[in-house]
Structure formats: C-alpha cells, structure tokens
Amino acid sequence: MKNLPTHHDSRIATVLDEHVIEIVSDSGEGAQRCGQSLAAIAARMGNGIWTVEIIPAEIQPPARSVAGASGNRVRIGARRIESGGDEADLVVAFNEQVLLGRVRAGELKHGARILLEGMWREHPDPRIAASYAAAVDELAAAGYRVIEIPMERECRTLVGDPRKGKNMFALGILCNIYSLDLQLARDQIALIFRKKAASVIESNVTLVEAGHAWAETHLDFKFRIPAERVTTPQIVVNGNTAAALGVLASGMEICAMYPITPATSASHYLSEVFEKVGGIVHQAEDELAACAFAIGASYAGKCAITITSGPGYSLKQEALGLAVMAEIPLVVLNVQRGGPSTGQPTKTEQGDLLATVFGSHGDAPKVVMATSTIEDCFYAIITARKIAETFNMVVVVLSDANLATAQQPFARPQFSETWLAPPVDQSPIPPGAKPYDWDPVTGIARRFIPGQPGGMHTITGLAHDRNSRVAYDPVINAEGLRHRSLKLAALQRTLVPPTVHGGDTGDLLVIGWGSTKGVIEEAVDRLRGEGLAVSSMHLRFLQPMAGGIKEIMARFPRVMTIEQNWSDTLEDGVIDDTNRRYSALAMMLRARYLVDVDCWSEVRGQPLKPGRLCEVIRGRLPGRQQKEVAS
C-alpha cells in the first residue's frame, strides 16, 4: 500500500458547474446506498441531481468480476438536472476489477480521478495482488489519476465488518470533496436507518465522519458546486416511488401485480402505505391473473392499476383485450426493460411502444402515454386514471428502467381535488337504458356498476350488442368496433399540441418520447449554443397523438427521432431503403403523417448521453451527412 501524504486542510475549493460521480463495488457492499445518500444530501443543499443505478445482470455475480459492477452514478449540478450527463469525472471503486469494467465500457472521462480501495495491493493471494498492481499501472498509463485509499483498513478500527462500513466511509470522503454539509449527511443517515437501533445510526455516522476527516487530512483537491436557493418544499424519490405516489394521489384503491424487475419497487412502496388510505395491493399467482383481478375490481366500481414490465405486459394482453371489449377502465404501468423474452432485466430500453399501441389480437384501441421525468411519473398516473374512467378505456403508462431507479428532486405536490376522477354515477339506471348506449360522437357509454338499481348486466369478451348480449351479427360487431375507436378521436380533440424546445423553425427537428426528454433537450441546447438551428419536440401521448404534430414537422426540412429501441442503419452494408427497419416512433410517424422521418437508436441498456447525441445530430444536419458516412 502506498503511503499518502498528510497535510492540514488548507485546500481552496474549485468551483464547478457540475460533476458526474460513480461509486462502484461488488454486489452487497453498499455502493448503491452510498450514491443515493450522496444525491439526497446534495439535493438538500439545493443542487440539481440525477442518479443512474448501475445494476449487474445477476443478483449476486462473482466477486471481483469485470462485469459485476454494482453502484450508482450521481450527477450534481448548480441548476436543475434532467439527465445522467456524460462520462464520470470522479469514481470511487472498491476493487480494480469492477473499475476496469466501467473503464472498458467507456463510462469514465479521460483523466478522471479514481479513488480506489488499496487493500488489494497487499492481498495474501499473490495473483490478486499482482492483478491489482497491473490494473493501477494500466490506469495510470491511460491518463487516469488513481488515488489509493485504505478504506477497509480505516473502517476496521471502527466497525466489526468493514465490508459493510466502507460505503459510509466513502460517503464521508465524497461529502468532504464536494463541500457538502456534514450535518445534512448525519441527518440522511438517521433517515435511512430510522427503523434500526440507535447504535446502527451512531456507527454509520461515525464512519461518515471518519471518511470526512480522512479526506481533510490526505486529499489535495476539493470542489464546490453552487446551489440554488430552494424556496418551495422538495421531495427526492425515484420514478417508481413517484408513480406509486401518483396512484395514492389519484384516489385509486386497488393495485394488482406480480413481481418483475424493474417495476416491483413501485408495488413494494404501495404495499407499505396503501392500506393506510384504504387501498390494497394484491400479489397474484401470475401476470394474467393480476390483470384479471384489476379488471374485476374496476368492473365492481373501483378503478384499478396493474404494474408490470415488458414480459409481464406480454402475458397480460389476453386480459387487456377483455377490458377493451367490455369497456372497463384500467390503468397499466409498464416499466420497460431490455427485450425480447427475458432480455436484459436490469437494463433500460424503449422496446415496448409498438406492443402497447398495437398489442392484443383484433382491433383493441388503448390510450398510451409515456413519462419523461421523475415528476411526470407522478402526474402521468393521475392523468391516466382520469382518462380511464372518463372514457372507459385501458390506459397504458410507459416508463422504463432509467426513470424507475433514477432520483431527481421536484416540488412537493400539493393535493388538488382536480386530481380525482368524478365519482361513478350510481344513481338508478333509467328504464330502457342499456350498458352500451354508445354516444354517437364520443363513443362513450354510461358505466354500469353491479348492484346498481336497474344496472344488472353481464360482461363478455365476445362480440355483443348494446344490451351486452352476445351477438355475431356483422353489423353489430362493426358498430362496437366503431364506437370503441371513436373514444380515441374524442380524447385526441382534448389534447394540447406538443411544444417545441428551441426555435419554432430550423434545419432539424428531433422528436423523442419517454425518458429521453432531458438528454435530448440538453443536447439541443448545447448545439444551439454553437449556433446550429436544431430544435426538439417530445411526445407524451403516443396513442392518440395530439393535433398539430404534422404542422410542426412541416416547419423543418429534416425530422428525426432519437429512441432506445432498435433501428437499422444505412451504413450497414446489407441495409438499404427497401429493407430498413425504422425505430418504433419513427415508424408510427412515417405511417401516420406520410413525412420522411429519419431515426437514430442506441440499445446499450444505459441512458443516453448528451455528448453522444450532439455528435449524432451534427451528422444529420444539412451538408454534414456525407462527412459522417465517410468517417
């Protein structure tokens, strides 16, 4: 172990606009908690933050494996942050192997500072010691600034199991490096371990203080990221928790689910709090049963939600067709992950758009929305419930693994009566009224509830007439199809056209959906700062799409989408205009509006980076395409 010099802390903090920090370790060493805590402390200081969880594909991958990194990426800024940013400026790593995995994946800036657990240099196994020394030499030769820190040795003097303590020691180091309030760190520890014994809180606070003191004595650099004064109460949660809070705020009372990554934490949170406000979480025996349970609850008068991810959504589609045919309101939260099949359970992707819009056999119109920020995960669920009950429809809300696990502060919502759907009309049904008395303009029929005077009826997945009686008459079947489709048109007439970020006209319009909003807009802002005429538009409603989209696209000579689902590239030698597969939204826009929409996709399982998007967009601007192809 190399000895580090000691000095009195006379460092002058370098003022930064932002920094990206990674904390990585083997699974079970607490790197994720360290990163989450750092983000929460910075947010309490008034900084903008965005976190990205680093999750291995396996629950417990082999220790010290290049592919086994577990941890968190934290972007801290002087202003509001809307994405995970570019490569890391500083990394804390508990062993050199997980660090090498991140380096080889291109996740570190050239010259980044690395704070590395140094105990491996003196490991009794000479192979491990040699591997560590070789890695440090390799990193130093590549231009990284490696600082070896005896984290485990320092923690061993404070706790019995240093492996379970060095995450808090590392948190103390980071609080010192970034000039974060140590008392806020103590408060955060007390919050995290509030259900534990006082001794647990005390030992973790001691570890944080020890790390802070070690950094003061041994490090020769320090940073400060100015914080904006926060004038309104804020909350810091991830997207799944925000969505669960939206379920509570919307007044829904039933959540039916089956555990699936990365959606499960939303229902876990609901299971802790839902009962306190009269709701229940039902874990069914499988995905289809969960969907059927939610449909039954809605049929009985309680608007319900079912929460899942891509594979679970596939299994629910038979039941979703029943909800469409029977016109029962239902909200579905689909937290997308890599696919198809089991795919990449812990990685982010936007591969379910076409499945949600067109899935289920037959013509089964559903409303499809996509959340774009952590805050939007909250409000989208509220909107979805109101639409579901107003139009008696299935509403699918698309999130993804990026939003599910990312943290971002937003203004604490103040409850509003407007969040709630109007109460179900349970007054007696007038004589002669029918359960499917479709409105000729909107396609909406009054919702009948079992037990309602005069409202006795059955529901069926078979074609039926206005009385809900099974009918195989082709005219009656077409009538039902028409009125179910009219609901989408009726909703579309109420939607506000999307806004354009940047100029109203220009050389290129970038269109996105879902969690790519922040990173696309950041890239657009950078490019506009270079004098390039680039704008963006983000879609919240994907079915139906709001009016005005074609008119907006017409103002730009070039239009492209940026998505996280697959698309072929013309640079591939076997792909041409006749066989190219476009990304999902590009395909839909081309078909609906007959506009030549280009696309670019990345499906690495990681959130997009603004620097990479700037490179891509520059290459699509007029006069630059030939240069891009040639390179």
Image (spheres, rainbow, N blue to C red):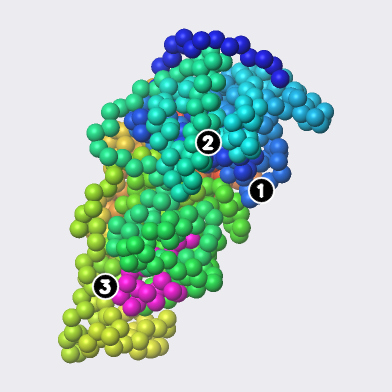
Mark identifier at residue 443: 3
The first of marks 1 and 3 along the sequence is 1
**One can see residue 51 in this view:** no
Give me the C-alpha separation between circle 1 and circle 3: 52 Å
Q: Is residue 302 on the magenta stretch?
A: yes
Give the labeled residue for mark 1: 60
Estimate the spatial distance between the alpha carbons at disc 2 and disc 1, rounded to whole Å: 26 Å
**Mark sitting earlier along the chain (2/3):** 2
Residue in the picture at 38% in, 89% down? 470
Query: How far across and how far down the image is residue 383, in percent?
Result: 29, 57
Q: Amino acid at mark 3?
A: Gly
Seen at 48% across and 39% down, the residue is 201
Q: Position of residue 108 (x, y in %)?
A: 58, 27
Question: Looking at the image, is mark 2 or mark 3 nearer the viewer?
Answer: 2
Residue 203's disc number: 2
Tell me how many marks there are.
3
Which residue is more in the foreground, 134 or 525?
134
* Distance of label 2 from label 3 (alpha carbons): 63 Å
Residue nearest the observer in this picture, 95 or 48? 95
Residue shown at the point (46%, 26%) measured from the top left: 175
CB contact under 8 Å: marks 2 and 3: no
Is 495 placed above or below 278 here? above
Say what secondary structure mark 3 lies in: loop
- Relative side of 21 to 470, left or right: right
Query: Which stretch is magenta?
Result: 292-308
Badge 3 crowding class, 10 Å Cα cut-off, few under 14, some 14 to 19, many 20 or more, is many
Name the spot of residue 473 as percent of width and height, x first.
37, 88
* Nearest to N terminus: mark 2 or mark 1: 1
Q: Amino acid at mark 2?
A: Ser
Residue 501 image-quadrant placement: top left
Q: Quadrant of the C terminus?
A: top right
The amino acid pointed to by label 1 is Gln
